[in-house]
């Protein structure tokens, strides 16, 4: 397998993934995944596409991720890994789509509007 480059997004996080066949090392922003994500749940989110296809430990993955919080970053990485697996082998797309890993989650923070205190919250009304 040649090196595969893909990107994934979630909220304001953007992840660029460089994947190639290897020992299963996952490096995020030049740090090991275990040191980058202190929470084991976030590590599981990143590994979900590989675990679904039973390919954990078969690829070396280098990730550059920026923006958002760590949960959004983990989901952006998950999308990028799923897209890289699909670009490597198109037959796995249906299995990944069934789990919802190929679809980008479009939910983002709504912008604040003028004349409002927040995006939708108005200032307190005072009749007198």
Image: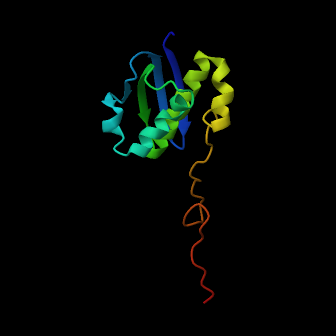
Q: Outermost residue toward the bottom?
A: 128
Q: Residue at x 51, y 42 (%)?
A: 12
Could you tell me residue 68's position as x and y percent?
A: 45, 44
Q: Is residue 8 above or below residue 71?
A: above
| 60 vs 58, nearest the viewer | 58
Q: Can residue 70 be seen in this view?
A: no
Q: Outermost residue toward the front?
A: 54
Question: Is 38 left or right of 10, judged from the image as shown?
Answer: left
Q: Quadrant of residue 95?
A: top right
Q: Can residue 89 be seen in this view?
A: yes
Q: How many labels does the image show?
A: 0
Check the picture and name the quadrant holding the C terminus.
Answer: bottom right
| 17 vs 50, nearest the viewer | 50
Q: In this view, does 108 lie above or below 26?
A: below
Could you tell me residue 25's position as x and y percent?
A: 37, 24
Could you tell me residue 100's position as x and y percent?
A: 64, 38
Q: In this view, does 92 lie above or below 41?
A: above
Q: Which residue is drawn at 51% across and 19% down?
A: 5
| 23 vs 105, nearest the viewer | 23
Question: Is 34 left or right of 61, judged from the image as shown?
Answer: left
Q: Which residue is drawn at 59% across and 53% down?
A: 110
Q: In which quarter of the image is residue 8?
A: top right
Q: Which colour scheme is used?
A: rainbow
Q: Quadrant of residue 57?
A: top left
Could you tell me residue 111's position as x and y percent?
A: 58, 53
């Amino acid at each position: 397998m040649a090196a595969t480059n893909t990107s994934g997004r979630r909220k304001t996080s953007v992840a660029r993934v460089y994947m190639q066949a290897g020992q299963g090392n996952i490096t995020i922003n030049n740090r090991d995944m275990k040191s980058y994500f202190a929470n084991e749940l976030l590590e599981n989110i990143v590994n979900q596409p590989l675990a679904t296809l039973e390919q954990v430990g078969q690829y070396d993955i280098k990730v550059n991720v920026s923006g958002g919080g760590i949960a959004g970053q983990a989901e952006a990485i998950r999308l990028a890994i799923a897209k890289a697996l699909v670009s490597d082998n198109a037959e796995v797309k249906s299995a990944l789509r069934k789990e919802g890993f190929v679809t980008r989650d479009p939910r983002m923070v709504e912008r604040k509007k003028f004349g409002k205190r927040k995006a939708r919250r108005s200032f307190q009304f005072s009749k007198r």
